[in-house]
Image (tube, rainbow, N blue to C red):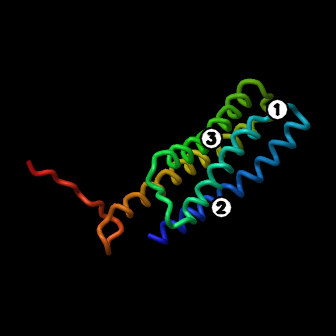
Amino acid sequence: METKRQQLRLFAVLTSAVALFFWVWAILNTIRNGFDLGIVSFLTVMITGTYLFFLAHTRSVNLRGSYILISVVASHTFVALNYMIGVVFALVFMSPARKGYAIYCAVFTVLWAASAGLGGWLLKQYRSSEEAPAGNDSVPIEHTHDS
């Protein structure tokens, strides 16, 4: 079980660090070129990453609730959607010489969508291990009700 908490902490730290880098970039873009939605979307990843890190760090906290799962997946999906907007914008409004920007946005759309999936998967794996019988952290307990 501790290994799964460690995986969640590592996921939280890595995604928050990446989000911090791109958040600063979004701030600089906003200063130079006008509002960049990355200021908001990357901030949500940093907030949920920090929250996940502290939840995973505290042994007494139950990570089985839906709130943290939804928050992590939603924040990473928000970033992916923001990049998807960038793809559409680049293809529709930018000159053909700027198609590299569309490729950049498409790559990061996929990466952040994968990150959303990985975060959800890690949290579900943790939930499954909490429900498993002692000595087996991969098989959930089946409940039967006899009448």
Q: Which of marks 1 and 3 is in front?
A: 1
Residues at circles 3 and 2 in contact by the CB criterion of under 8 Å: no
Question: 8 or 26, which lies in front?
Answer: 8
Task: Report the disc number at residue 59.
Answer: none
At numbered mark 3, what does the secondary structure look like: helix, strand or loop? helix
Question: For the point 58% across and 56% down, which residue is it?
Answer: 52
- Amino acid at dot 2: Val
Residue 74 in the image, given as x and y percentages of width and height:
56, 41
Examine the image and state in which quarter residue 130 appears: bottom left
Examine the image and state in which quarter residue 124 appears: bottom left
Q: Which of marks 2 and 1 is nearer the N terminus?
A: 2
| Cα distance in 3D space between marks 1 and 3 | 18 Å
Q: Mark 2 points at which residue?
A: 13
Residue 50 in the image, given as x and y percentages of width and height:
65, 55
Residues at circles 2 and 1 in contact by the CB criterion of under 8 Å: no
Q: Mark 1 points at which residue?
A: 35
Residue 102 in the image, given as x and y percentages of width and height:
71, 37
Q: Mark 3 points at which residue?
A: 80
For the residue carrying disc 3, how many other residues have a C-alpha within 10 Å: few (<14), some (14-19), or many (20+)? Answer: many
Rendered position, 120 above or below 101: below
Question: 5 or 21, which lies in front?
Answer: 5
